Structure formats: C-alpha cells, structure tokens
Image (tube, rainbow, N blue to C red):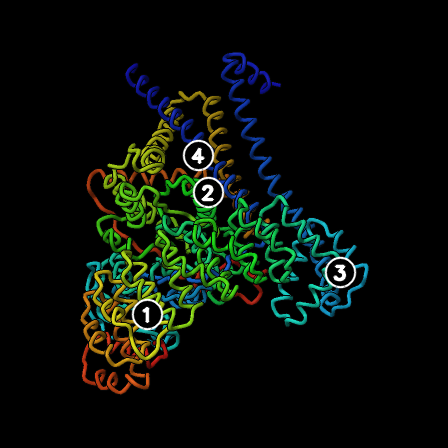
Amino acid sequence: MESVALLASIFASKPWFWGATTVIVAVLFLANVALFLFVYARRLRELTRARRAARFEREWALMLDELISGSPDPELGARISRFNELERPIAATMLLERLGSASEAERAAVLQAMRETGATDVLLRSLRRREPWRRALTARTLGHLGVTDAVPALIERLDDGSRYVREAAVRALGRIGDERAIPPLADLFLNPGRAGAGIVYEALLALGDAGNPTFREGLWSPTESVRVTSCFGVAAALEPEEARRELERMLADTAGEVRAAACETLGRVSDTTAPDALAQATRDPVPSVRRAAVLALGSYDDPRSLPFLLAALDDPERDVALRAGEALVQLGRLPAAGGRARAAIDETEAWPLETALVLDSLGAV
Amino acid sequence: MSAVIAILIVISVAIFAFFVIYSVTTLALTAFSLFEEVQQKIERGDRFRPVRRPLRSGISLVVPAYNEELVIVPAVRSLLRVDYEPLEVFVVDDGSKDRTLTALSEAFDLRELPLGDRFGLETEPLEALYVSAADPRLHVARKRNGGRSDAINAGINLARHELVGVVDADSLLDRDALARIIEVFSADPDRVVAVGGTVRIANGGVIENGVMTQPRVPVHGIAGSQVAEYLRSFLSTRVAWSAMNGLLIISGAFGVFRRDLFRAVGGLSRDTLGEDMELVMRLHEQLRPVRPGVRIEFAADATCWTEAPPGLRPLRVQRVRWHTGLLDNLRLHRRMIGRRRYGAVGLLSLPYTILVEVFGPILQVTGYAIVIVLAVFDEIAWEYAIALLLIVLLVAQLQTAAAILTEEIGFGRYRRRDLLLIGGWGLLEMFWYQPLSALWRMWATFLWLIGRRPGWGTIPRGAALAQPPPVEPELAPAPLSR
C-alpha cells in the first residue's frame, strides 16, 4: 500500500511528465513484447509448416514418379489443382530437381501428363501471383518443362516489377527456345538494365541462329556494355570467320572495355593467322586491352605473334607481362608456331615466362 | 555551488537531448532496415539461391595474415571451397614470426614462383611468392612486415581478376557468400563499385570442413554480447545506410571491390587504424563528385564468420583501435560533412556518426559519472533516474528485438535457444558491456586528442576456427564457451 501511495504522490507532483513517461514506457514495452512474440509465433508456424511440408514431400514424390512414368492417375490433375500455398512451391521445387536429371523423353512425358491433368494451366495462372518469388519460381518451372503455351505469358513477365521475375522469365524463354521470344529478348539485350546482361545473352544464344542478328546489332549500340556483351555473343554464335571479321572491326572502338572484349573473344575464334589489329592491340594504351590481346595471340597458331609476345614480357603492367608469359607457353603447344615458340622460351630469361612455366607444370595455364 | 548545479543541469539536458535524438534516429534506421529485409523476403522467398551468371567477373580474394598459424589452414580451405568461379586466393604473410608460412606450405604443397617486379601500389618489399601445387588457385606471398593495409595492398598488386575481395585470416565465408555479393554487383554493374557482406561471430558455432554448419550463441558473456552487438550493427543499421547509399564502412573482415578503382584511389591507407572505413570514405569522396551515381552497397545475406575477442583485454584493445580509426577517418574526410554533393554520406551518415559514435560515448560516460556523484551525495532524484533507465533499457532492447526479427525473417540461422540468449545478452549488456565500451571509446578519444596512437595489440586467435568438429555437434559444448 505504501508503494502505491508513493507512486500516487510522484504522479501528483508532475502529472503531465509522469503521464508522458508512462505512455512512452508502455509503448516501448509493448513493442518489445510484440516483436518477441512475433519471432516466436513465426518459429512455431515454421515448425508446423515443416511437418506439413515433410508429409507433402513424401506424397508428391510418389505423384512425381507417376508423372515421369507418363501414366498418371486421372485424379492427379484434380489433386494438383487443390495444392495449397505451402504445397505449390514445394511441388515446383521438387519437380525442378527431378527434371534436372531427367532425360528428354521423361521431360516430354511429364509435360504431356501435366498438360492432360491441367497442371500447366495452374502454373500459367501462378505467373500472376502477388508474391514475386512465386512468379519467379513458376517461370522457372515452365521453362524447365518447356511449355510453349507459356511463351506469351512469359514475355509479359519481362516487364514484371521484380528483377528476379524478369530474369527467371528470360531464362525460361531461353530454355523453351521459341522464336516468338526473340524480339522482346533482343529489346532487353539492346536496352540493358532490366535484367542481367549475361542472362539475356545466354537466352539469346539458346535460341540459336535466330538470335544472331541481335548480337550483330549490339556491336553498333551506343551503350558500351551492350557492345562488350555483343562481342561475346558474336564470338559464340557466328561462324568463326565471320565472327573474326566483325570482332576485328571492334578493335577500333573508342571504349577500352569494348576493345578488351574484342581481343578476348578473338581468342575464342582463333585459327592459324592472327589478325594484324590484334597484334597491334598489344601496344594499346589501356592495360586491360593489352592483357586480353596477348592472351588471345597465344591461341592463334601463328609464328608472327612471337615478337609481340616477347615484347609484352617487358610491358609496364605486371599482369600483362604475366599473361604474355602464359600466351608464349600456350603458343609452344601449337603445331605451326610451337617449334619457334619453344626455342624462344628456351632462349629467354624473363620472370613472367618462368612464372608461366611453373604454372604450366601444375596444369594452371 | 549554484554554478556547479547550473553546469550539471546543462550537461544533463545535453545528455537527455542526445538520448532522444539517438533513440529516434536509431529506431528509425532499425525500422527502415527491417522494412528493407521484409521487402527482400517478399521478392526472393525462402528458398532463394543466387543464379549462375554467365560472363560474370572473376574474384581474387586477398587474405592478410600475421601470426595466424592456428587458423590460416582452415580459413584458406574454407575460401577454396567457396562456390564461385573464376576465383583465386592470395594469402599475404606479413612477416609473421610464427609458423604461418610453414603451415601453409605443409598443407598446400607450395612451389616457389619468381617475384618479378612492376607492382602498382607501394608496399614493403616482397620476399617470396608461391603457388600451391595442390590447388593452383592458391598463391602465397611472403613480405616484410608492414601492417594489415600494407599486406592487403601487396595482395591487390598480385591479384589478377577484375574484382578483389578482402577476407581476414580468422574468418570463414559461407559457400555462397561470393555469389550473393555478385548478385548485388550485377543488379547495377555500372554503378556499384564495392559491396560488403555481413560479419557474424563464429565463437561457439560448429564448423565442419571449413564451413559454419551450426551457428551458436556463446553462453560466455563477452562473446555473447558481441553476437547481439554485431547483429544490431549489421542487420539493423547497415541495411538502411546501404539503401540510402550512405554506407561509411565495409568491414575489413569481408568486402569486395573493383580492383581498378581500389588501385586508382591508392589502395588502403597506412596512416589510419581504421583503414577499411577510410577506403570506403575515400571512394565516396573521390568518386561521387565525378560519378554521382556511384554506389557502395551491403549484401546482408553474404555471410562471413569471424572470431570475436574472447576476453575483456583483447576486446578493449580492439575497440580502442577501432575508435581511434574512426576519429582519424572523420578528421581526414571532414570535407564531406554536410555537403550535398556527397549525398547521404555528407548529409546523413557522417552527422549521425559524429553524434552517436563521437559524442555518444563522452555523454554516456559523463552521465554515469553524474549519477554516481549524485548518488554518493544522496542528491539523486531516484524516480526520474529509474524512469530514464527504464526507457533507455527498453529502447536498447527494442533495437535488439528488431535485429532478432530481421535475422529471423531474413535468415533464420539460429536456434530458438540462441535467439533467447541474444535477447538476454542484449538486455544485460546495458549494465556492463555498454558502459565498458563507452569508457574504452572515451579513453580512445582522449588518447587521440593528446596524439597517442594505440598499437594493434594481440588478439588470441584460433579457438573458434581451429577446433576439430565435435563428434556429436548437438550435445558437444561450444568451443569458446568453455
């Protein structure tokens, strides 16, 4: 009673102050309790969900066997359409895992069965779900299944508000390989920022020859990063001779990064005659260009590269000198230039070369 | 007497005003971070894994090592197991006096390489360079002792990939840590120049094959309180600063930078004890006026596990050094304070840091002193003091609770018992850890003002990382809690 009286007297002395203090303390205390309760309620929910998920995983594994065998129970479609919020992502993830190791025939059987049971319609509807991660997962599933009916809906998702959904749609379109996807993917490639450049590049490559004009067009893009990625695209998609022609032109680009990409990719389409411009690029003012140029020269079976590579051993950039050593070692393995390169290696005493020889002995060149 | 009372009143009002501003801003940052993490969760879902990105940049990891013989081998093994290609690891032995180099040589079969020349950044001379025959992605350099910054700069000179990561030798990376960092780089490749990861405390956790498999919160108060402190620091504030592009620090334990810019700004400074923070501030100061969109980001889901100082003495040494570094950096980069051209760094994070980190400890210690003096003279108004203490306690606990919630929503790495421990240590630290920390920081301020520099000191290492995995992880005692 005494303490209550004491509290009452304290409150009576400055009611506004103590009133405000009580409110602040109460709010802070309740906020603390609410946060901790939330954490533990979430834990409890996760525990329950984990049990339900484990049970569902066992059931779905059996259903997946049926789907992959190509003779599913006619009731399966109805069961799939009744999957709840918890079950759908689990089903999609497990399906993706199974498809990862499935043969083409098994994949086709699953797709057929899913079409017959109406499961693909469920997936198509899921592309419009509210949560971005559900849309992204659905796009991945459709891509792995190769659902051509989903192409228009996936193209729509290229303008999704979430980058993860857009990138999942890009990958799915690449996997499905339908040519209807080329114009929007080309647009995404030439106007970067909405999806990772590498991801769009890979999707266009998967579309085969139909994607090639985009890479050619990209070489003329005003955006530097597009020109860089286009160099890789041209090298991977065009015939080597044609690619070399296009890429040699890029060695005159104003941007160092583009010239470096052109050098690197010229190394990927090498033959027996190294382009003169590539040899000249070993004297480029930008170190990354020189680095890429010397490495690329090492993959052309052309003895004319030797003096350029030997000169590059004295490059003021340590990294360029090291790459020149590695390129000389690579050249030493090639049939036409190999003899002269090996003789030059024997006569030259330069630390970048010695480094390359040690690395080569370890299989690292 | 009346003058003394007047001074006391002024100081008390200043402390109260500081507390109000601190509480409001810190809780706002915490709420912002929580909001960002929830958004991220809605976007990515529970089962998010970074995707393989074609044409992605290679990463060279630089690991400075000084007397790290106990931890260096498991740390390097952990780095070589990271899921990322192309990757190379450069360990720079900064003139260790122990068996750091021998341990590496025995574990990884090192072969000598020519030293060469043409190093970009100036450092103490290299004495030897090696490559591992067991895994040629690993290179080891031995150099004359020059300090952590010097060792990292030497590693950057040797690194060959476009991106360079700096990882401490007493740290372990999650296997997907680099892939998650790259997610941030690729979201905005033209503007992001550096990304830091979350640093968590490894003490007490179960490590298998160089990977943290079961994080635990130590029962031991010093390490336990640091778990709560790190969670608050990384999950409750850095997420928000990163979203505002106002990040002032990428922890030295784990950060990835564009190599060309790292070298262009001159590498890490040897003149400050807070070299990791200094580099980030220098990047802001030099790049933002010429490239206004440039961003330095934080990837909350890219995790690095580090060993916390297990005792009060090493903790004091660490905190005094950190605080001296902070003061150095604020002085060095004072030009940015309040300047709009530096965006959130100049207008928000620097003023906040000065208020909370520089004046905070001074006001905190002064407040404790006033309470003690008044209590001794029996002049204290207990009802006011208790009310204030209660509010301080609840605000601090709210921050811890929000960090736990962010951890739970975003990552869910800890068991229920560990979350309780974090909450418990968060509550208790107000009575011992916080006052001690404030005292050390005030001491560091004093030393800094009179021009005395603390040394790096020696922090005992190895207990958390070098322990072999227990046979029964669930039942075994946590290595550092003994």
- CA–CA distance in space, label 3 to label 4: 57 Å
Q: Nearer the viewer, mark 2 or mark 3?
A: 3
- CA–CA distance in space, label 3 to label 1: 57 Å
Q: Is residue B296 above or below residue A24?
A: below
Residue A37 shown left or right of residue A158 in the figure: right
Q: Earlier in the sequence, mark 4 or mark 1?
A: 4
Residue A283 in view (yes/no):
yes
Q: Which residue is mark 1?
A: B139
Q: Earlier in the sequence, mark 2 or mark 4?
A: 4
Q: Are marks 2 and 4 on the same chain?
A: yes
- How dense is the environment of label 2, judged by Cα within 10 Å: few (below 14), some, or many (20 and up)? many
Q: Position of residue A137 (x, y in %)?
A: 60, 54
Q: Position of residue B219 (x, y in %)?
A: 51, 51
Q: Position of residue A158 (x, y in %)?
A: 54, 50
| Tag 4 secondary structure | helix
Residue A86 shown left or right of residue B321 in the figure: right
Between A45 and B398, the one nearer to me in the picture: A45
Name the chain under label 2.
B
The residue under the point 30% across, 85% down is: A336
Q: What amino acid type should be assigned to the residue bearing mark 4?
A: Thr
Count of labels in the image:
4
- CA–CA distance in space, label 4 to label 1: 43 Å
| Tag 2 secondary structure | helix
The residue under the point 24% across, 53% down is: B264
Q: Which residue is mark 4?
A: B26
